[in-house]
Amino acid sequence: MEESYNFQQVELKWQKVWEEQRAFQVQTEPARKKFYCLEMFPYPSGRIHMGHVRNYSIGDVISRYLAMKGFNVLHPIGWDALGLPAENAAIKHGIHPRTWTLDNIAHMKAQLRRLGLAYDWSREVTTCLPDYYRWNQWIFLRMFERGLAFRRKSWVNWCPQCRTVLANEQAQGGSCWRCDSSVEQKKTEHWFLKITDYAEELLSGHELLGKWPEHVLLMQKNWIGKSEGTRIHFPVSGEKAVIEVFTTRVDTIFGAMFLVLSPEHPLVPGLIASSPRRGELEAWVENSIHQAHLRRDPDEVDKEGVDTGRRAINPYSGEDIPIWIANYVLMEYGTGAIMAVPAHDQRDYEFAVKYGLPVRTVILPEDGSVSVPEGQAFEPTGRLTNSGSFSGLRSEEAVAAMNDLAEAKGFGRGSVVYRLRDWGISRQRYWGTPIPIIYCEACGLVPVPDKDLPVEIPADVALTGTEGSPLEKSESFIRASCPKCGGRARRETDTMDTFFDSAWYYFRYLSPREAKRPFERRDADYWLPVDLYIGGVEHAILHLIYARFFTKVLRDLGLTGLDEPFPHYLAQGMVTKDGSAMSKSRGNAVDPDEMLDHYGADALRLFILFASPPDKEFAWNEDGVEGCFRFLNRVWQLFQENKGLWAEAAPLYGSTPLADPRVAAVRKKMHQTIKKVGEDIGLRTHLNTAISSIMEFVNQLKREKDGLRASAQGRGLLKQALETIVLLLGPFAPHLCEELGQAMGRSTFLFRSAWPEYDPALTREESVTIVVQVNGKVRDRFDVPLDTPDDLLKEEALRRPRIRELIGGRAVKQVVCVNNKLVSIVV
C-alpha cells in the first residue's frame, strides 16, 4: 500500500480491471430478486456536464448498494443520438451528422468510464444506428395498423427560405432562428400519434405512481387537462350548420350573451363568406392565426375579436345571440368554440366590456346578497336566477337537470374533454428516423413491409440549411417501388420526432441484441418496471408522458404486461453556479475533466452527492471538492497508519460486553453508522446525510485509534471498523475503497460483497433528551434513560426549577407525554 494517495494511479487501475473483467454485466435470472436502476440517457453533445455527473453518480451509488444487498442490478446506459444539433454541426463544420455523433459518443463514453460508473456496457444502445431505429419503424407500423398513427392537416410555423417546419422556440419574434426570414403559418399534412386515446388512463395511472414528486404529477395532470362538462349544439340562424360548444358551467347558459369561435374553427370561412366585410375579416383571421402560433402562452395575448354578423340560437333559452371570432379561444381545447358568459367568466367579462356587449347575471351567491361585483365576473357556483324553470336551483342541481334536458331533446350531452392533443411526430429533418411509409400513384399510402426494415437514413445528402429537408433531394432515397403493385412510388421524407426514440429505450436495454422483435417478453417480465428512474424535472411532462403512452401501447400489442414503466421517479435538482443553472451559454459551466484531473473521480462524486439532497438544487463550490479530496486522503492515511492490523485476527464481538468503555463506544457508533447509511441510501435516498455519517465515524476512529490499539479487543474492533468503512464508503468512492479492500486482503469486488449487518441492540441510545413545552413553547430540556415511564417524565418536568417558575400559581390543566421525546404542559 502506497504511503500517499495517488488517485490517478488507483482510479486508472480499477477502471481497467472493471472493464477487462466485464464486472457489471448481468443476465436475466428469474430466481433472483432484481433491481432496474436507470438514469435518463444523454444526448451526445460532445462533453458531459455537471448535471450528468450528478445524475449518474446518484444512480451509481444506489446500484452498487443494492448489489451488495443481494439484488441482481441492471444499470444500463445509451445515447439519445438523433436530432437537430447534429445537423447544425454538420452545416457549421462540414462534417456528417453520423461522424459528429459517433465521435462525440466515443469522447463522452471515455468521460463516463473515468467516473467509475457501474454500467453494463454490453447493453449500450445508440438510437442513430439502424439496429435501434429499425424498431422505431416497426413500432410505428404496429401503431399505424391500429389507427394510432395517422396523417392530418395542421397549422405549423413555416420558413419559406429553409423550407422547413419550425418549433415555436425556433420562430420567436416571427423570424426563423437560422436565417431570420419571416415565418409563415402553413397548413400541411403531418403524422400524428393518437395519444388522446390513452388520456384517461394516463391520468388514472397516477394512482400507481406513489413515489413520484407531487409537483411532477401536478404538471402532468395539468398537461392532460381533464374537464367534465356538457357539449351543446347551437344552431346557426338561417342555416343547417351547428356550432358545438363544450362548457364546464352549463348552469350559466342563460347568461350566454354571444358565442366566440377560434380563428382556426372550420366554420369560420363559411360564416364570413357572405359578409360585406369579408376581406377585412379574412385578413384579421389570418393575422390572428399567425400570431397564435408564435405565442407560447395564450394568456399573454390582448383579447381582440370581430363580429361575424351572424347569429346562433341558444337551445335552452331560444335567444338569438351574435357569433364572434376572438384570439383568446384555442382550437386545441374543447371544440374551438365557447359560449361567452361575461357575468360569470372573467375573460368573457373583459371582452364584453371592451366591445360594449351585454352582461346578464344568472348565478347569485347562496345568500343572494350581490349580483355581479363591480369590475369583475362572479365565477363561483351558487343559485340560479334569470334562468327560466331552472331558477332557484343550486348550481350542482342545475347541471344535472340541464344535462338530462339536453340529452332528452337531442341538442347536447354530458361530456369529458382533455387539454392533451395528439402527438405530432413529423419533422422535416435529415438526422431522424425515416417514417416507413411509401406513396404509390396507384395504391396510395402503403406501409413498408417488416422484411424491408430498416428504412435507413441515406448517406448521400448535402446539408446546407437553406433548402428544406435533405431527404427531399436524395433521389436514391425517394425513389421506391410499391410493395403492393410494384409500380412507381416515393418514400415519405418526414422523419420522426426524437422523443419517439426516448419513449421506449428502457425496453431495448433488456434485449439489446434481439433481432426478431424490439425486446424479449421474458426479459421484460423479469426486469420491468424500472425500479428507480432518475432525471431532470425539465422532462417531467413530455418525455415521461410519451414513455408512459408507449408502455401502454406495447402492452396492448402483447409485448409486455406492464401498465406503468416508472413507479419511482427521482427528479434530481439542477447544478447551479453564481446563482443560475450551470451552462456554457451563461459562461458559468465547470468542466468535469478539469475536476477529474485535479481531484479524481471519487472526490468529485463524493462532493456532488454530499453538498445537497439529490432532489434539491446544488450550488457548485470548488472548495467543497477540495474538502472531499482531503477527506479521502485522511481515510487513506487512517488505513496506512493501521496496515499492521491486516495480519491480525479480527474477532466479531457482537453484543458481548466489552471491558473498555471506549471500545464499546466505537462499536456502538459503528453499528449506528451501518444502520444510518443503509437507511439513507436504500429507504430515503438521502445520500448527503449518508456521507455525513461516514465522515463522523471516520473522525471518531481517528480520535480513538491510539486508545483502541492499546488492547487486543480494541485492535480487533479497529480492524472491523476499518473494514466497515470500506464497505460503507464503497458505493460513493469505489476506486479508493476497492484499493483499500484489496490491501486488506479482499479477493472479490466490493459491490459483490455483502453489505454489513448491524445489531439493533447496539443502535439504541441509552439516554434521550426530553423537551419540555409550556403552552406550546419550548421552555426546558433534560436527559433521562431511554423509555422512561410517562409518570416519571411528568414528575421530573413539573419539578424543574425553570418550569415551576413559569407556572407560578397557575393551575395545570393538562400534561401530555410523548415517549422519548417531550412533555407538553398546558396551564
Image (cartoon, grey):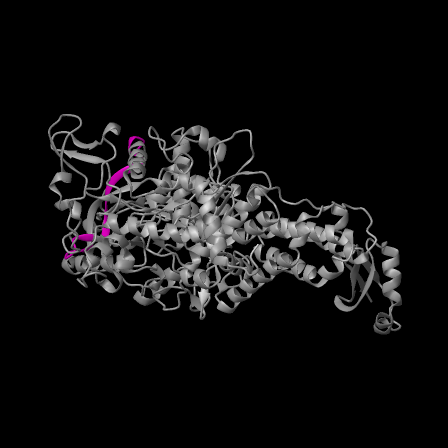
Tell me if I can see residue 450 in this picture.
yes
Q: Position of residue 252 (x, y in %)?
A: 43, 53
- Judge by depth and name the residue closer to the eye, 219 or 129: 129
Indicate the position of residue 803 as horizontal and vertical percent values.
84, 70
Residue 302's spot in the image, x, y percent? 31, 65
Q: Is residue 205 above or below residue 310?
A: above
Identify the residue at image location x=84%, y=63%: 813
Give the number of callouts.
0
Left or right side of 604 for 767: right
**Residue 602 magenta:** no
Residue 732 in percent (x, y) is at: 55, 53
Left or right: 694, with 599 as reference point: right
Q: Quadrant of residue 550?
A: top left
Does the image show residue 237? no
Quadrant in the picture for residue 281: bottom left
**Image position of 507 with respect to 773: above or below:** above
Quick one: 280 or 456, which is closer to the camera? 456
Quarter of the picture holding the C terminus: bottom right
Q: Which residues are magenta?
A: 144-164
Query: From the viewer's perspective, is residue 806 above or below residue 583?
Result: below
Q: Residue at 64% across / 54% down in the picture? A: 643
Q: Nearer the viewer, residue 456 or 738?
A: 738
The residue most toward the top is 485
> At 46% across and 36% down in the image, what residue appears?
563
Left or right: where does residue 45 sit relative to residue 9?
Answer: left
Quadrant (top left, top right, bottom left, bottom right) of the N terminus: bottom right
